[in-house]
Image (tube, rainbow, N blue to C red):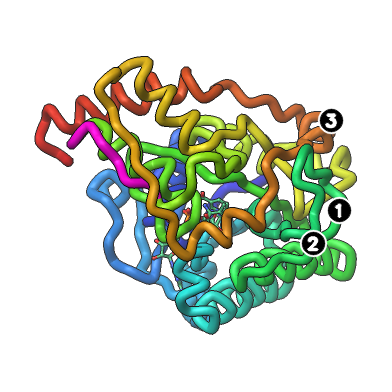
Amino acid sequence: MIKKILVTGSSGQIGSELVMALRTIYGGENVIASDKCDNASKKIKSSGPFEKLDVLNYNEIDQIIDKHQVDAIVHLAAILSAVGEKNPMLAWNVNINGLINVLELAREKKLLRVLIPSSIAAFGPTTPVENTPQKTILKPTTMYGVTKVAGELLADYYVSKYGIDVRGLRYPGIISNETMPGGGTTDYAVAIYYEAVKSGKYECFLSENTNLPMMYMPDCLKATLDLFHADYTKLKNHSDFNVAAFSVTPKLMAESIKKYMPEFEITYKPDFRQAIADSWPNSIDDSCARAEWGWQPAFDLDSMTQDMLKVISEKHKQGLI
Ligand code: NAD
Ligand code: AKB
């Protein structure tokens, strides 16, 4: 039975919320948050252990596993697509060498489980764009995508070669209101809500009809926890589950915001991230996740918009943003 979980990259957009969700289930002391930067929120630091940990340092991870008697790792430390295109060697180094450190330690220490997210960035311009199947062409054109495909293959290798329980899911763009995203192509879908509340207008770095798969954070947490707790014997796939909630363009997202804030205005000024977005699918077939571990999203675009605007408006009123 899993008792102690180490989360790498836990100060990021997903980690900052996933650590709190895991602590609710496993207890604060039993979920060790960690990040290269010593910048965890007060909430994270006061509800359980936090370790400053660079995933490129094998010995440091080794020591922290021993110190806390860790038996599972959720590996979130990564460089995302836009930052990765500006600095491809950094993306390769963190996403590949950090990952293999985690997998090797899982093998050496016989850890019970490792969860590693992949991304829709594993797909590329030659992948079918609509209802992209789980098993399909994986020829990404970004360094981030290259590391995600290699990561899925490495993770599956550790499953078949060493019998380690490694699981992973291809997140779409994740939209949330607690921690700002860390430098991806789908980041506009968070910034648009903050700017709507703060100034009533937003200049989008993707063009109006760029259609991408997205998911609200409560569904991302649910998908991650559902896969983490799924019955291993029922999994036919391991490291590459497609998961979907809804697909949206900047124009449709702006229309959804206008339902609640009629004065909201959007303009478009595409930059280098447009080419990255154009290489990703429009929509995802997640039937394997639904069949193998019961995946089902709860939020659609409008229910997410309502919640995002409510939470961010409250933060704005309190002077927090
Ligand atoms: P993020 O950029 O918000 O956070 C990543 C964290 O990793 C940061 O806090 C950063 O300080 C840390 N980090 C970077 N280099 C490190 C190192 N060498 N050692 C330790 N920590 C390091 O990312 P996120 O959005 O929380 O993503 C988590 C995972 O989910 C990643 O694998 C990412 O590829 C994947 N993913 C995210 C999204 C999304 O929309 N957020 C979508 C698809 C996949
Ligand atoms: C990014 O845009 O890089 C991420 C992702 C979809 O992997 N949000």
Contact, CB < 8 Å: mark 2 with mark 1? yes
Q: Which is nearer the eye, 162 or 121?
A: 121
**Quarter of the figure with residue 259:** top left
Amino acid type for the residue under numbered disc 2: Leu
Label 1 secondary element: loop
Q: Residue drawn 43% across and 41% down? A: 189
- For the question of whether residue 27 can be seen, the reply is no
Mark 2 secondary-structure assignment:
loop
Mark in the foreground, 2 or 3: 2
Residue 138 shows which numbered tag? 2
Disc 2 CB within 8 Å of nearest ligand 2 atom? no
The span from disc 2 to disc 3 (Cα, nearest Å) is: 22 Å
Q: Position of residue 255 (x, y in %)?
A: 43, 24
Bounds of the magenta span? Answer: 199-204
Disc 1 designates what residue?
136
The residue wearing badge 3 is: 291
Kindly identify the amino acid type of the residue bearing the numbered disc 1: Thr
Question: What residue lies at 68% left-to-right and 71% top-to-bottom?
Answer: 146
Disc with the residue nearer the chain's start (2 vs 3)? 2
The span from disc 1 to disc 3 (Cα, nearest Å) is: 18 Å
**Quadrant containing the C terminus in the rendered view:** top left
Q: Most prominent secondary structure in the magenta stretch?
A: strand
Any atom of ligand 1 within 8 Å of the CB at mark 3? Answer: no
- Residue 295 coordinates in the image, percent (x, y): 71, 30
